[in-house]
């Protein structure tokens, strides 16, 4: 069977792309190396629907973060996925960090982020009583939210399939050939033919790109987490970040869309396939998170896990473009 579009990778990007394409009269298939959907980065991340004050002005990431907060409300209703618009808060612990928050605020305004404002340490503690006495100021973004990322992926793929998309699991792509306007996408002896191929293979995207002569370099960055029992899910309402700096970047304390508490992630360059959690990583999370709040009850950790970021050495921004070849 020849498809109009073959999508490689059944993560959140491949699944939502398939769902969108099924709004048109197209034959679409999704080709996944593993034996189910949402087994890559889409199952192991913070689940934050970012407000859009962090990405540099003019980038695709800035534009799509803001657009994402707007469309997520409708999307999660249509797909019946757990989501909360709980807002995010970036904490500053000194005057220097507060100056950085002011820069993030200005960037957010330039990016068109709604419901963004700066508050004092006392105002932050009034909103979030568990915060440390050392919190000096905070940047609040009430338009940010949290979503269950694997539910979102599974629901998007299910909806695409209800509308006719086909999913092939255990289908690791090994080669792509092109002749007479048709791509043959191969997995060992098996293959499908398609007029267009979409590469949404996460940490494997550089290998897929290389199959058609494009060069990207993915340098995976590992993020370790601890997930706590639902009894701890009300410690904070907002997703609590810290100002990026010497004490680390991006260790957050956040409720999840399912009512648990999530603490992490670390950020460390690693090899593809490295999903280990380490004592050193978890100790680092505890040490950094303690700046935000000392009230995390680590006796209630129910699991730890790791996700791999598809960081690309060639760009800090999202890459959505036609193949150069
Ligand atoms: C620690 C961490 C924290 C994060 N926090 C957030 C956050 O709070 N908010 C946010 O918006 N984003 C966050 N992200 C980013 C987010 O998780 C990713 O942007 C998103 O999950 C990427 O989805 P994807 O579909 O591109 O990739 P993936 O979910 O990784 O899916 C790619 C799929 O491609 C498949 N594949 C790979 N190679 C092949 C091949 N050769 N053949 C066939 N299939 C193949 C894989 O098996 C996989 O299923 C975070 C990521 C990490 C790791």
Image (cartoon, grey):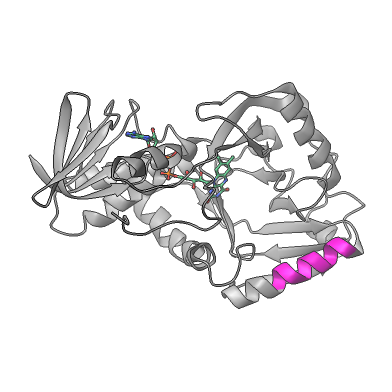
236 vs 139: above or below: above
Residue 220: image quadrant is top right
Q: Using residue 142 as the reference point, say whether residue 4 is left or right of it.
A: left
Q: Nearer the viewer, residue 199 or 287?
A: 199
Residue at 40% x, 45% y is 12
- Percent x, y of residue 297: 78, 31
Give the total of numbered labels. 0
Q: Is residue 174 above or below residue 111?
A: above
Q: Which residues are magenta?
A: 96-105
State which quadrant residue 91 falls in.
bottom right
Residue 101 is a magenta residue = yes
Residue 120 visible in the snapshot? no
In this orientation, does residue 94 appear? yes
Q: Is residue 71 left or right of residue 129?
A: left
Left or right? Give the position of 216 relative to 195.
right
Q: Residue at x 48, y 65 (%)?
A: 60
Quadrant into which the N terminus falls: top left
Q: Residue at x 55, y 26 (%)?
A: 274
- Residue 22 coordinates in the image, percent (x, y): 21, 54
Quarter of the image for the C terminus: give it: bottom left
The stretch drawn in magenta includes residue 274: no
Could you say where residue 302 lies in the image, as x and y percent from the top left?
Answer: 64, 24
Query: Is residue 319 depicted above or below 225 in this figure?
Result: below
Place of residue 214 in the rendered image (x, y in percent of width and height, measured from the top left): 35, 48
Q: In the picture provided, is 17 more to the left or to the right than 202?
A: left
**Dominant secondary structure of the magenta stretch?**
helix
Most foreground residue, 320 or 82: 320
Residue 120 to residue 156: above or below: below
């Amino acid at each position: 069977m020849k498809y109009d579009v073959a999508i490689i990778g059944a993560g959140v990007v491949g699944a939502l792309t398939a769902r969108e394409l099924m709004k048109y009269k197209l034959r679409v298939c999704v080709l996944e190396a593993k034996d189910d959907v949402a087994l890559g980065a889409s199952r192991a991340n913070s689940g934050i629907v970012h407000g859009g004050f962090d990405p540099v002005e003019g980038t695709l990431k800035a534009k799509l973060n803001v657009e994402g907060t707007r469309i997520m409300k409708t999307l999660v209703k249509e797909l019946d996925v757990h989501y909360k618009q709980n807002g995010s808060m970036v904490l500053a612990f000194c005057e220097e960090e507060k100056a950085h928050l002011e820069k993030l605020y200005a960037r957010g305004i330039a990016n068109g982020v709604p419901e963004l404002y700066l508050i004092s340490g006392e105002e932050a503690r009034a909103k979030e009583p568990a915060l440390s006495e050392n919190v000096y100021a905070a940047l609040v973004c009430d338009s940010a939210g949290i979503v269950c990322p694997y539910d979102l992926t599974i629901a998007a793929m299910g909806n695409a399939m209800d509308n006719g998309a086909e999913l092939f699991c255990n289908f690791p792509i090994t080669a792509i050939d092109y002749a007479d306007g048709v791509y043959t996408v191969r997995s060992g002896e098996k293959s499908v033919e398609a007029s267009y191929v979409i590469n949404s293979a996460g940490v494997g995207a550089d290998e897929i790109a290389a199959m058609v002569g494009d060069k990207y370099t993915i340098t995976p960055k590992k993020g370790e987490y601890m997930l706590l029992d639902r009894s701890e899910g009300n410690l904070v309402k907002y997703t609590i970040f810290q100002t990026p700096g010497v004490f680390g970047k991006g260790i957050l304390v956040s409720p999840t869309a399912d009512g648990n508490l999530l603490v992490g992630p670390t950020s460390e360059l690693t090899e593809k396939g490295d999903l280990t959690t380490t004592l050193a990583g978890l100790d680092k999370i505890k040490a950094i998170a303690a700046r935000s709040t000392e009230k995390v009850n680590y006796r209630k950790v129910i699991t730890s896990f790791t996700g791999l970021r598809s960081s690309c050495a060639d760009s800090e921004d999202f890459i959505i473009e036609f193949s150069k070849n």
